Image: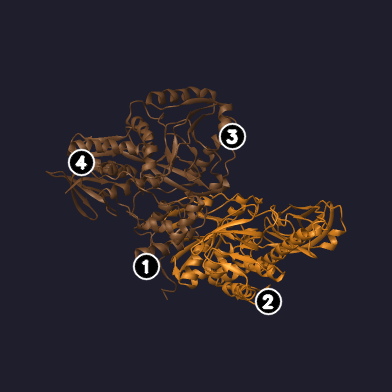
Chain colours: A brown, B orange
């Protein structure tokens, strides 16, 4: 019998796991995919929002501001890339200026520090590539950018080190109340637990509605993005938003924490909870709208496009807490933007609820820090030389675009919750994430995966399940 | 720090030919840095024949062609290091590289020859909509898996792009037991060599769908199908022309991009049309002593021309070093030669030329100008103007973007025009 079962190994689920792993508790995370960070957490804007968007008094507002405050220390302790680059909300027309003032006021009430309204000259001085038509902008110095994969992995790895279990390829099929708690039926057998955290992203309504009378309805709201090469990464230095509209914050243009330029997302309500396909119209919209705020976008430098799903709940706020009629079943539902920013605060809040319910005691030996995969680019020349002498695998460059060595890939495979697929290696090391989009490195990475995991090349997948990369050997049908 | 006269970045066909030529022109200390586990570059995975018709007057496979040069490199005792990745080159020509054996290497070069080749344009660069499952390969990646490792990446295949690698892979996949359902090409003509269309598609009954593109990719885990649609003259899909193809694999042969990230970082000026360095008649970039040749300079169709161009780069690098040494030895006597520059202008249907400018005093007896046209021409003339004056007018029965053109300029001819400022090359339709 577990104390806590968490459904979903996205950033919310793993943030909860990490917070709860401070306590003497038997924790298990169930994930239907083969790895952490496979749903909404892997395909989003990677923004740490300042907190002026959400309505005053909402959970979104409160947890956004709290998450933003926590991010710095957390990124140092858990070693994931985070940068406070600041954001600008662009107002193009004088008529819309009042909307900017509304944001400013709301931000102040939400507790966002340092907000400033800037006019054309000041904006242009800050970001010369902003359109000449800009009238004014809201500047939020506390906004930032983060690596969502690294943050999600950091939470998960740290939770594992502190005793949490993870079960992958384990799809929850049914949840039943028992006298002692909950019985969770999955594709890999039945799990018993005292409490449940429902952090299932776009599926959170499905699980909530299995146990609660007051129904939730989550609509996947698809957002498509274009990612540009690192050569375009300094086109703007701050995150550039449009004035928010009905479907959210509009199309943004932002540098990523690794130095690429990201454009997107669109907002398209769909039915398919796995509908992460892009469409030509949506990609066109990304490009067209991104160009309204930022001029001279080097669109020839697009290296990939992708789509993610926001878990939009009808009430338009996060739904966090125990359902009235299902004590011990804690929802983290409707976690759309600013969900990535809020994740650490959500983890804190949820673990607070369960600490009380389960009367949890703190561990003596909680390990609060975690080291990420060594990034040789961060070393000085002498340290780098030493590393190469001691561990020659770091001298064998596998991904030429991102300069990722065999050493980093080996680390990614052999660390807790190690990579088992090409995408797993990619999210951990960036191998295959560069301008050639894994054309050159994928055969080599597959070879390393096969060797290290003791598998046949034909068993290596892109992202688990039936995503095999090679289907046979030459002439095997003759 | 180690020091060499010439360091060549890349041990593919360009790097090998450049090294051989530099050595044959008297340069002793030469080093080739190769990132892969053997010399030969992409030729090693090109196991089809048709290489070497110009160079050796016989038909070789890619590995055989490479081997001829590798043997020369070995006979001439040219040093090379494998599995060695160049991370950075400073404008002062200090190369930082790394490998398993030596760790971090720093090498000072008197001259550098850039010969890094090119990469394939990816699906993302085209913004092809749909899912992102396994089973989408650039044609070259699939070629490596099949030809070097013996793995079949798919059984039912659609290919987008009729560049040469796409055509060659249509045949290869068929020979290895896959069914190639169609090759789609966005343009109204193929980007590949005509011989490849005949020998790789027509001979196997594989349909070539011109003016078509992929508008959707289906399948979340592995490709389950693609949708092709006809495109209008601006390349936009025409609604209502969609056709579904059930397949497990999509190969992309949609263009090659010279790999100039290192060149760009060191300050080499790049031409936005070729994505390769801007060079003069000596194939020298804007940084003195830094030369470029092969697919890193501009994408070629035939390796024979890569070898020719690279050999020239090797000779010019050798000259550069000799001139520099004699300049240092006889500083008073040596006069710096007048380097009056003639720009070459691409006009009327010519997309670019290599080189971009000529210093006649530095020319060899003749100079090969290589260029590409922007569309298909039948019965046209290649016209060369010295300033306003038409000096060469050559008939071409057929010219297409997929087949590189060349013309020869004689030094003697240029010397007759001492005040010449620019040479214009254009296509005139008959």
Point out residue A251 in the picture as x, y percentages from the top left corner.
Answer: 48, 37
Q: Do the residues at pointers 3 and 4 share their chain?
A: yes
Q: Identify the subunit bearing mark 2.
A: B
Q: Do the residues at pointers 1 and 3 share their chain?
A: yes
Q: Which residue is at a point 30% across and 51% down the rendered structure image?
A: A32
- Residue hosting label 4: A211
Nearer to me, A296 or B213: A296
Can residue A214 be seen here?
A: no
- Residue hosting label 3: A128
Classify residue A127 as left or right of residue A366. right
- Dot 2, crowdedness within 10 Å: few (<14), some or many (≥20)? few
Residue at the farthest left position:
A179
Nearer to me, A259 or A365: A365
Secondary structure type for disc 2: loop
- Dot 3, crowdedness within 10 Å: few (<14), some or many (≥20)? some
- Dot 1, crowdedness within 10 Å: few (<14), some or many (≥20)? few
Q: Which residue is at a point 45% across and 51% down the rendered structure image?
A: A375
Report the disc number at residue B57: 2
Q: In 3D space, how far apart are the residues under numbered discs 3 and 4 (Cα atoms)?
A: 53 Å
Q: Which quarter of the rendering shows the N terminus of chain B?
A: bottom right
Report the disc number at residue A456: 1
Point out residue A6 in the picture as x, y percentages from the top left corner.
Answer: 25, 45
Point out residue A258 in the picture as x, y percentages from the top left corner.
Answer: 48, 46
Q: In 3D space, how far apart are the residues under numbered discs 1 and 2 (Cα atoms)?
A: 43 Å
Secondary structure type for disc 1: loop
């Amino acid at each position: 019998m577990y104390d806590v079962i968490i459904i979903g190994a996205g950033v919310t689920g793993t943030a909860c796991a990490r917070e709860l792993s401070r306590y003497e508790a038997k924790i298990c995370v169930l994930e239907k995919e083969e790895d952490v960070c496979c749903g909404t957490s892997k395909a989003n804007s990677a923004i740490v929002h300042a907190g002026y968007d959400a309505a005053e008094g909402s959970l979104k507002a409160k947890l956004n501001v709290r998450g933003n405050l926590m991010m710095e220390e957390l990124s140092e302790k858990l070693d994931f890339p985070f940068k406070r680059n600041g954001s600008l909300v662009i107002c193009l027309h004088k008529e819309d200026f009042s909307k900017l003032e509304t944001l400013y006021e709301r931000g102040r009430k939400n507790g966002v520090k340092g907000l400033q309204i800037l006019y054309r000259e000041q904006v242009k001085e800050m970001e010369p590539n902003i359109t000449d038509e800009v009238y004014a902008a809201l500047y939020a110095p506390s906004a930032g950018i983060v690596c969502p994969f690294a943050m999600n992995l950091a939470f998960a790895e740290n939770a594992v080190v502190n005793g949490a279990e993870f079960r992958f390829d384990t799809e929850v099929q049914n949840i039943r109340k028992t006298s002692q708690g909950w019985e969770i039926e999955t594709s890999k057998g039945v799990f018993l637990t005292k409490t449940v955290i429902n952090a299932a992203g776009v599926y959170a309504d499905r699980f909530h509605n299995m146990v609660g009378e007051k129904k939730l309805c989550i609509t996947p709201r698809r957002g498509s993005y274009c990612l540009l090469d690192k050569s375009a990464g300094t086109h703007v230095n701050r995150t550039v938003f449009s004035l928010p509209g009905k479907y959210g914050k509009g199309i943004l243009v932002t540098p990523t924490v690794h130095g690429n330029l990201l454009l997107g997302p669109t907002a398209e309500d769909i039915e398919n909870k796995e509908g992460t396909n892009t469409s030509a119209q949506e990609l066109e919209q990304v490009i067209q709208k991104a160009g309204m705020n930022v001029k001279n976008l080097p669109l020839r430098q697009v290296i990939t496009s992708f789509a993610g799903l926001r878990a939009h709940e009808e009430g338009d706020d996060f739904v966090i807490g125990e359902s009235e009629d299902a004590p011990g079943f804690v929802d983290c539902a409707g976690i759309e933007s600013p969900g990535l920013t809020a994740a650490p605060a959500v983890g804190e809040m949820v673990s607070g609820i369960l600490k009380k319910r389960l009367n949890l005691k703190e561990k003596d030996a909680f390990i609060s820090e975690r080291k990420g995969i060594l990034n040789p680019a961060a070393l000085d020349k002498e340290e780098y030389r030493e590393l190469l002498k001691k561990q020659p695998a770091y001298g064998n460059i596998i991904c030429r675009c991102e300069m990722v060595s065999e050493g980093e890939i080996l680390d990614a495979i052999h660390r807790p919750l190690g990579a088992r697929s090409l995408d797993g290696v990619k999210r951990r090391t960036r191998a295959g994430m560069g301008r050639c989009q894994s054309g050159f490195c994928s055969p080599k990475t597959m070879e390393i995966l096969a060797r290290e995991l003791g598998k046949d090349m034909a068993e290596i997948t892109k992202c688990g399940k039936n995503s095999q990369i090679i289907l046979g050997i030459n002439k095997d049908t003759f | 720090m180690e020091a060499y006269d010439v360091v060549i970045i890349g041990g593919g066909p360009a790097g090998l030919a450049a090294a051989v030529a530099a050595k044959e022109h008297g340069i002793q200390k030469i080093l080739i840095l190769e990132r892969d586990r053997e010399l030969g570059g992409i030729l090693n995975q090109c196991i089809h024949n048709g290489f070497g018709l110009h160079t050796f007057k016989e038909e070789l496979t890619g590995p055989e062609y490479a081997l001829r040069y590798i043997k020369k490199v070995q006979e001439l005792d040219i040093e090379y290091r494998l599995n060695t990745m160049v991370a950075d080159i400073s404008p002062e020509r200090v190369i930082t590289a790394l490998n398993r054996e030596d760790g971090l290497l720093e090498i000072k070069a008197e001259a550098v020859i850039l010969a890094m080749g090119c990469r394939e344009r990816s699906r993302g660069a085209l913004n092809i909509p749909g899912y992102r499952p396994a089973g989408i390969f650039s044609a070259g990646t699939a070629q490596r898996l099949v030809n070097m490792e013996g793995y079949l990446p798919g059984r039912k295949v659609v290919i987008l792009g009729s560049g040469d690698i796409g055509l060659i892979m249509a045949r290869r996949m068929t020979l290895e037991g896959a069914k190639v359902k169609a090759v789609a090409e966005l343009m109204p003509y193929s980007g590949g060599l005509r011989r490849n269309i005949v020998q790789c598609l027509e001979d196997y009954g594989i349909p070539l769908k011109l003016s078509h593109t992929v508008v959707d990719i289906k399948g979340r885990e592995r490709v389950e199908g693609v949708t092709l649609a006809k495109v209008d003259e601006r390349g936009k899909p025409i609604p209502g022309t969609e056709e579904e193809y059930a397949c497990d694999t999509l190969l992309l042969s949609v263009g090659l991009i010279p790999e100039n990230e290192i060149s760009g970082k060191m300050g080499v000026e790049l031409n936005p049309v070729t994505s390769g360095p801007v060079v003069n008649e000596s194939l020298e970039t804007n940084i003195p002593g830094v030369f470029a040749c092969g697919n890193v300079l501009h994408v070629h169709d035939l390796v024979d021309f890569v070898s020719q161009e690279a050999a020239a780069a090797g000779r010019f690098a050798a000259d550069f070093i000799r001139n520099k040494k004699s300049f240092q030895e006889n500083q008073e006597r040596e006069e710096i030669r007048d380097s009056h520059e003639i720009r070459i202008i691409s006009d009327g249907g010519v997309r670019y030329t290599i080189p971009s400018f000529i210093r006649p005093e530095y020319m060899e007896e003749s100079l090969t100008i290589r260029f590409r046209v922007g569309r298909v021409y039948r019965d046209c003339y290649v016209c060369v103007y010295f300033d306003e004056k038409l000096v060469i007018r050559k008939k071409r029965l057929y010219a297409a973007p997929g087949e590189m053109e060349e013309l020869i300029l004689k030094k003697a001819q240029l010397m007759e025009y001492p005040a010449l400022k620019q040479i214009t090359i254009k296509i005139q339709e008959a």
